Image (spheres, grey):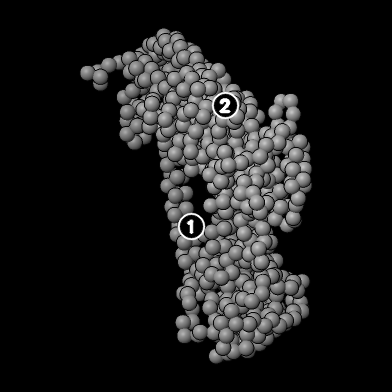
């Protein structure tokens, strides 16, 4: 039935379906992006809010910790009279306004031989600073603040509690101190500092998120230290609230919080204030082992975007209605004359470019359309012919480049280890051309039983010319080396041959070395190439000294010298082309020699293959999506001893 409908009907229907799909996609995409943006903003804002609150809390707790720790060091390294102890405690409380009270509690008969209990406690009230001694009626030996640090042998934050009178939430930091008895440190007592949590409550209460978002603080066992609902404080834990509300998500988040984890729970937690679903962000207070949580109400955060989407939806529906009216009118005006071209169009669409088109009788749009069809038919014929020829040439060129690439790679050694029966050395090399074919190459071969010749080079330019120049250079160097020449003679003669009739002014940088496998001595000549890196087994990693000698293939009479390097057992030489150090990231930064040296230091204990492949992966990670601009070649030789 649908096939029998008119073009106008189909045009209107398809237009509406397409526009509806596009509009729905845009609407959905807009909502998705907006939501992600808001979630991202929530995360960033929550990080800032929580970081600020956490830093303030950490600052208060860290400052409190320093006081008893320093006092413990003081007591351990000095002998004090009762008057001196009281003066120290008084100074601690007077000069540190955040401290409510401080005590030094000694072991039985630890301070006075005739006194089992000795624990002076100085504390502040609104009117004055007072002194009180803990005695047998308080029996401080059984208190958590004394028992826990004594048993654990380290400072400890004690769970929050209500202070005297039950009106102030307190928290204690207890530090064990010791005395030297002979050559041993013996437990002598505990220094405890009490702080009021009013300041922390004020910090957490200052966290306001829109209308109903809030922050809260829980202790190490999940007890609420601060909360907008006052009845929760010191009376409830996050787990009792989760059980009472049958909130499985809150219980899971509570477990993570007391474990000291941080994270985000998106739309999983129900607010105790507003009964709304909330995002919850939680971070640990590392100093005390507590955890800070902040709730972000979902509906309040998403309100603006939901209102905006309603407006967009209304505008979209109105626009579709108006567009439908316009399309119906336009389609009826243009589809009638187009029927005369439909038959010819079907033939052209099926590939019959010889079909006869209607005669041009008018100069209106239909007439111009007919002329366009005639022109299109001729253009298609020409285009198909040209495309056929171009495709044929491109396929031939790609085939030739593939063959050239295979030939070029085939002349390079690629079996590793290359000399399984030679235990004196270990070699690994790799090459990654920037195009189908490149100008870098490496080579290594034994001149005789004692001498290994190795070469790495980088030809100027890219493509076929560079590949041919590379093959010529490799052949010349190997021919000169097998004749028993020294490295400088090899490079000098190759330079002379390459310079003659070098009309294209191409050149190559070459590093050529000869390793004596029985002694570790290396004779080398550097023709303008990057200095290799020496990796000493018992020392460090460093660049070989630069020689500043000329590149090869430019000046016929250029002079090159041979230098000497000695490799000890386990030492390596790492050779590379400038495609390694000059590899760029998206911002134009180079991989650099410094980064290469540092990377080799990290990988020093690995095998040659692992080091080379790891460097290649580091380069790929550094450059990212940046296209490779130069060939990358690396070779590593390790001398294992005669």
Q: Which mark is residue 2?
A: none
- Image position of 334 with respect to 406: above or below: above
* SS state under label 2: helix
Give the residue at x 59% y 69%: 604
* SS state under label 1: helix
Residue 508 visible in the snapshot: no
Mark 2 → mark 1, Cα distance in angstroms: 90 Å
Q: Position of residue 255 (x, y in %)?
A: 44, 39
Q: Position of residue 244 (x, y in %)?
A: 38, 26
Picture quadrant where residue 252 is located = top left
Of tags 2 and 1, the one toward the viewer is 2
Tag count in the figure?
A: 2
The N terminus, quarter of image: top left
The residue to which callout 2 is attached is 166
Q: Is residue 315 left or right of residue 113?
A: left
Q: Earlier in the sequence, mark 2 or mark 1?
A: 2
Give the residue at x 45% y 21%: 276
The C terminus, quarter of image: bottom right
| Nearer to the camera, 141 or 46 | 141
The residue to which callout 1 is attached is 397
Q: Position of residue 504 (x, y in %)?
A: 67, 65
- Image position of 549 with respect to 598: above or below: below
Q: Residue placed farthest to the left in the image?
A: 1
Give the residue at x 39% y 25%: 245
| Nearer to the camera, 195 or 595 | 195
| Nearer to the camera, 431 or 575 | 575
Q: Position of residue 633 (x, y in %)?
A: 58, 66
Residue 152 visible in the snapshot: yes
Give the residue at x 77% y 71%: 548
Picture quadrant where residue 361 is located = top left
């Amino acid at each position: 039935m649908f096939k029998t409908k008119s073009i106008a009907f189909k045009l209107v229907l398809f237009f509406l379906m397409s526009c509806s799909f596009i509009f729905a996609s845009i609407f959905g995409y807009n909502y998705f992006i907006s939501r992600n943006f808001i979630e991202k903003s929530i995360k960033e804002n929550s990080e800032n809010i929580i970081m600020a609150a956490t830093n303030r809390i950490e600052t208060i707790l860290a400052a409190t910790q320093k006081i008893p720790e320093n006092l413990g060091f003081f007591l351990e390294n000095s002998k004090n009279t009762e008057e001196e102890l009281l003066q120290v405690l008084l100074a601690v409380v007077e000069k540190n306004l955040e401290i409510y009270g401080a005590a030094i509690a000694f072991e039985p008969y630890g301070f006075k031989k005739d006194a089992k209990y000795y624990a002076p406690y100085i504390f502040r009230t609104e009117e004055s600073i007072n002194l009180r001694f803990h005695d047998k009626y308080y029996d401080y030996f059984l208190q958590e603040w004394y028992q826990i640090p004594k048993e654990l042998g380290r400072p400890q934050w004690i769970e929050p509690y209500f202070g005297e009178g039950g009106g102030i939430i307190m928290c204690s930091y207890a530090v064990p101190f010791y005395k030297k008895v002979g050559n041993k440190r013996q437990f002598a007592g505990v220094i405890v500092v009490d702080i009021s949590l009013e300041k922390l409550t004020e910090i957490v209460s200052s966290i306001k998120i829109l209308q109903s978002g809030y922050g809260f603080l829980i202790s190490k066992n999940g007890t609420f230290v601060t909360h907008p609902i006052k009845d929760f404080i010191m009376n409830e834990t996050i787990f009792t609230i989760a059980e009472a509300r049958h909130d499985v998500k809150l219980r899971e988040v509570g477990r993570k919080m007391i474990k000291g984890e941080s994270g985000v729970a998106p739309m999983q937690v129900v607010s105790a204030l507003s009964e709304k679903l909330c995002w919850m962000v939680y971070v640990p207070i590392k100093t005390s082992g507590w955890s800070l949580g902040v709730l972000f109400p979902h509906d309040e955060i998403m309100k603006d975007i939901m209102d905006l989407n309603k407006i967009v939806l209304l505008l979209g529906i109105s626009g579709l209605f108006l567009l439908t009216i316009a399309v119906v009118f336009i389609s009826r005006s243009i589809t009638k004359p187009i029927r005369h071209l439909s038959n010819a169009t079907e033939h052209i669409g099926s590939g019959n470019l010889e079909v006869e088109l209607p005669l041009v009788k008018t100069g209106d749009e239909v007439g111009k359309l007919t002329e366009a069809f005639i022109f299109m038919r001729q253009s298609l014929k020409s285009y198909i012919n040209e495309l056929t020829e171009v495709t044929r040439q491109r396929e031939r060129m790609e085939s030739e480049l593939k063959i050239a690439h295979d030939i070029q790679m085939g002349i390079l050694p690629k079996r590793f280890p290359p000399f399984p029966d030679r235990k004196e050395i270990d070699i690994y090399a790799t090459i990654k051309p920037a195009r189908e074919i490149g100008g870098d190459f490496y080579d290594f071969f034994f001149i005789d039983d004692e001498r290994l010749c190795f070469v790495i080079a980088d030809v100027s330019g890219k493509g076929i010319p560079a590949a041919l120049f590379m093959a010529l250079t490799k052949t010349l160097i190997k021919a000169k080396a097998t004749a028993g020449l020294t490295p400088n003679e090899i490079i000098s003669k190759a330079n002379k041959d390459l310079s003659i009739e070098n009309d294209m002014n191409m050149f190559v940088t070459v590093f050529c070395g000869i390793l004596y496998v029985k002694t570790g001595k290396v004779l080398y000549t550097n023709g303008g190439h990057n200095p290799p890196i020496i990796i000493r087994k018992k020392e460090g990693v460093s660049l070989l000294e630069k020689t500043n000698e000329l590149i090869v293939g430019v000046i016929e009479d250029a002079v090159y010298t041979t230098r000497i390097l000695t490799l000890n057992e386990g030492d390596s030489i790492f050779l590379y082309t400038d495609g390694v150090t000059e590899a760029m990231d998206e911002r134009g930064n180079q991989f650099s020699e410094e980064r290469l040296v540092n990377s080799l230091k990290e990988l020093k204990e690995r095998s040659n293959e692992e080091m080379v492949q790891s460097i290649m992966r580091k380069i790929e990670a550094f450059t990212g999506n940046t296209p490779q601009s130069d060939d990358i070649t690396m070779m590593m030789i390790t001398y294992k001893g005669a």
